[in-house]
Image: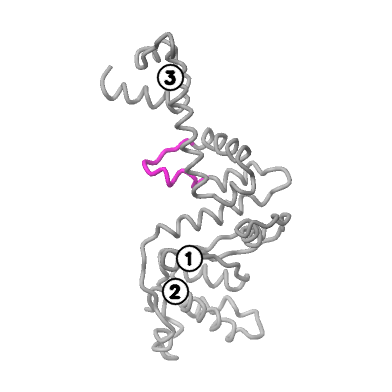
């Protein structure tokens, strides 16, 4: 076999593909003490365990909620449905929230939302840093330039749309408290990084719409328009913008 053929066969063996005994014997040496099939099983088991470990690193709260055995079963089933296809094992879990949405767990339909929140946190941690703008940058626009100006948000900021209120669930798991029951209902959370710490917070529907507009690159007039249905529209819009600047969500104001 060529090197490429040898590598392809070893990959197939290690990832659990069905390979004929003759093909396996071409690559793996059998001994009376340890037949080829058992040697292959060692590699395959290690590969599967490493994938589950990678998921556990990115979804620690999901792993804590499910427990060791249920999380292992989930990880192995997910790996069969979404084999690792990127050189970076850190990307392996990117489809887990969608997988859990397609195959919801009995009694815990909020697992996909918990996974979506944790994946957003994982992504935010590895994003490039960016120096934040301050309230003075917004104030410097003046009334004439305000509506047409645009916010350039930091790369680590994420908006997560949720079908269950999982922020309290995440907090309970963080504190080691009993997990609350699922809370159905549309909600949203912002995820961002401050230094080496990843943070998240639930945000209201108007602020979520405003943040979506900002992430699309819309002008401040459009962003503030998300609060138009409120009696205190101007106050609410400026309060949200002020909090974004205070939390370091805005890299610059153009």
Tell whether label 2 touches label 1 (CB within 8 Å): yes
Front tag of 3 and 2: 3
Residue 123 located within the stretch drawn in magenta = no
Residue matched to label 2: 248
Is 217 positioned to the left or the right of 3 in the image? Answer: right
Find residue 39 and name its label: 3
Tell whether label 3 touches label 1 (CB within 8 Å): no
Given the current orientation, which residue lies at the most extreme bottom position?
143
Which circle's residue, 3 or 2, is located before the other in the chain? 3
**Front one among 60 and 252:** 60
Q: CA distance from mark 1 to mark 2?
A: 9 Å
Q: Secondary structure at mark 3?
A: helix
Where's residue 142, x and y in %?
Answer: 42, 91
Find residue 192 and name its label: 1
Which circle's residue, 1 or 2, is located before the other in the chain? 1
Is 27 positioned to the left or the right of 177 in the image? Answer: left
Taking 71 as reference, is 59 above or below it? below
**Front one among 13 and 236:** 13
**Which residue does the image show at 52% across and 67% down from the upper left?**
212
Q: In the image, which residues are magenta?
A: 83-95
**Which residue does the image show at 68% across and 43% down from the upper left?**
105
Given the current orientation, which residue lies at the most extreme front position?
33
Q: Secondary structure at mark 2?
A: loop
Query: Which quadrant is home to the C terminus?
Result: bottom left
Instruction: Quadrant for residue 251, please give it.
Output: bottom left
Find residue 142 and name its label: none
């Amino acid at each position: 076999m060529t090197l490429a053929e040898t590598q392809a066969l070893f990959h197939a063996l290690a990832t659990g593909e069905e390979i004929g005994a003759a093909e396996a014997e071409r690559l793996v040496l059998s001994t009376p003490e340890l037949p080829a099939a058992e040697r292959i099983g060692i590699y395959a088991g290690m590969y599967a365990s490493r994938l589950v470990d990678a998921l556990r690193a990115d979804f620690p709260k999901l792993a804590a909620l499910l427990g060791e055995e249920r999380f292992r079963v989930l990880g192995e089933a997910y790996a069969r449905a979404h084999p690792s296809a990127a050189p970076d094992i850190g990307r392996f879990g990117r489809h887990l929230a969608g997988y859990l949405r397609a195959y919801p767990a009995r009694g815990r339909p909020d697992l996909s939302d918990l996974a979506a929140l944790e994946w957003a946190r994982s992504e935010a941690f590895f994003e490039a840093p960016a120096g934040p703008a301050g309230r003075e940058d917004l104030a410097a626009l003046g009334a004439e330039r305000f509506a047409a100006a645009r916010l350039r948000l930091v790369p680590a900021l994420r908006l997560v749309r949720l079908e269950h209120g999982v922020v309290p669930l995440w907090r309970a798991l963080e504190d080691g408290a009993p997990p609350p029951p699922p809370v159905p209902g549309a909600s949203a959370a912002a995820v961002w990084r401050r230094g080496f710490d990843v943070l998240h917070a639930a945000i209201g529907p108007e602020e979520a719409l405003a943040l979506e507009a900002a992430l699309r690159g819309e002008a401040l007039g459009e962003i503030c328009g998300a609060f138009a249905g409120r009696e205190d529209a101007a106050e609410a819009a400026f309060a949200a913008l002020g909090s974004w600047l205070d939390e370091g969500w805005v890299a610059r104001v153009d």
